[in-house]
Image (cartoon, rainbow, N blue to C red):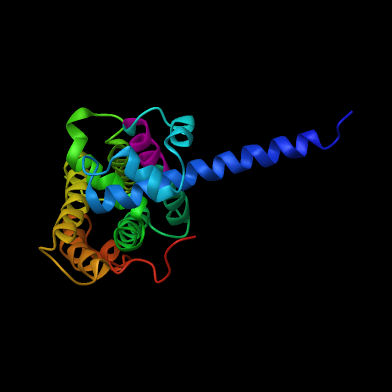
């Protein structure tokens, strides 16, 4: 009996998973820089340092690769949602903190930037190109519903309109900074926008409990 075989299988599987992730990360940097249509599979293979045959072992098409980038960004989003949903914080504070996490990603995380840029280019094609936005909208709506159930939203605030506003801000910030129309610290601008938005969602003591600046530390 070859007692070393299982170890070799695990090593081979781990190596394959690492190669796949490396392809996703390399493609994300290219899609972020050149756009989905501007990056070829040859470009991706070259950037990742693999053959086209190795690429096709992991992905059957560029669309499937785009879906993997969206999935990686969605994994980051789910992790951030779990982090910000601290029971000691008002759920609206968690929502503010989540948008600051997104602002941080726009400055630091190519996978998220690539997901959003690809959504702008290919969103009319539906899934998987919109997966990150779909998950983000779901998270925002869930938080707003929780805030409403906790009595933290003012009467008359419609979840649909509030969630549309938050998503519009996220999409607008991404587009303005990507295009170079706006410059400077993205989180600072998110903070100032929340100062304008929060009085429309809550008032009085509830408003004073919220910090539009978001968390001092990001990423877990």
Q: Main secondary structure of the magenta part?
A: helix
Q: Which residue: 34% across, 58% down? A: 105
Does 2 sit above or below residue 116? above
Q: Which residue: 34% across, 54% down? A: 110
Does 52 sit above or below residue 211? above
Q: Report the side of 192 relative to 149 (left or right).
A: left
Pick the residue in front: 201 or 191.
Answer: 191
Q: Report the side of 14 relative to 128 (left or right).
A: right
Picture quarter containing residue 141? top left
Q: Quadrant of the N terminus?
A: top right
Pick the residue in front: 96 or 110.
Answer: 110
Residue 83, horizontal then vertical, whole percent: 47, 55
Residue 119, horizontal then vertical, whole percent: 23, 40
Residue 11, horizontal then vertical, whole percent: 68, 42
Does 80 sit above or below residue 41? below
Q: Which residue: 42% across, 60% down? A: 89
Picture quarter containing residue 56? top left
Q: Which residues are magenta?
A: 63-72
Pick the residue in front: 164 or 27.
Answer: 27
- Does any portion of residue 135 appear in the rendered image? no
Q: Report the side of 122 relative to 209 (left or right).
A: left
Q: Which residue: 33% across, 54% down? A: 95
- Does any portion of residue 11 appear in the rendered image? yes
Residue 92, horizontal then vertical, whole percent: 32, 55
Would you say residue 181 sits in the magenta stretch? Answer: no
In the orientation shown, which residue stands out farthest toward the left? 181
């Amino acid at each position: 009996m070859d007692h070393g075989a299982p170890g070799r299988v695990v090593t081979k599987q781990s190596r394959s998973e690492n190669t796949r992730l490396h392809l996703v990360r390399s493609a994300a940097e290219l899609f972020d820089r050149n756009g989905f249509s501007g990056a070829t599979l040859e470009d991706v293979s070259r950037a990742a340092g693999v053959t086209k045959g190795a690429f096709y072992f992991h992905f059957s098409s560029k669309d499937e690769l785009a879906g993997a980038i969206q999935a990686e960004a969605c994994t980051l989003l789910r992790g951030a949602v779990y982090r910000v949903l601290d029971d000691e914080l008002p759920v609206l504070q968690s929502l503010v903190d989540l948008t600051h996490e997104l602002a941080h990603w726009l400055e630091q995380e190519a996978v998220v930037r690539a997901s959003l840029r690809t959504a702008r280019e290919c969103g009319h094609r539906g899934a998987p190109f919109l997966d990150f936005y779909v998950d983000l909208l779901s998270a925002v709506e869930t938080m707003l519903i929780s805030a409403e159930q906790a009595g933290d939203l003012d009467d008359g605030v419609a979840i649909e309109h509030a969630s549309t506003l938050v998503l519009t801000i996220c999409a607008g910030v991404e587009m303005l900074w990507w295009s170079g129309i706006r410059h400077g610290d993205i989180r600072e601008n998110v903070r100032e926008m929340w100062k304008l938005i929060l009085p429309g969602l809550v008032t009085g003591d509830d408003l004073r409990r919220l910090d539009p600046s978001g968390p001092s530390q990001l990423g877990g």
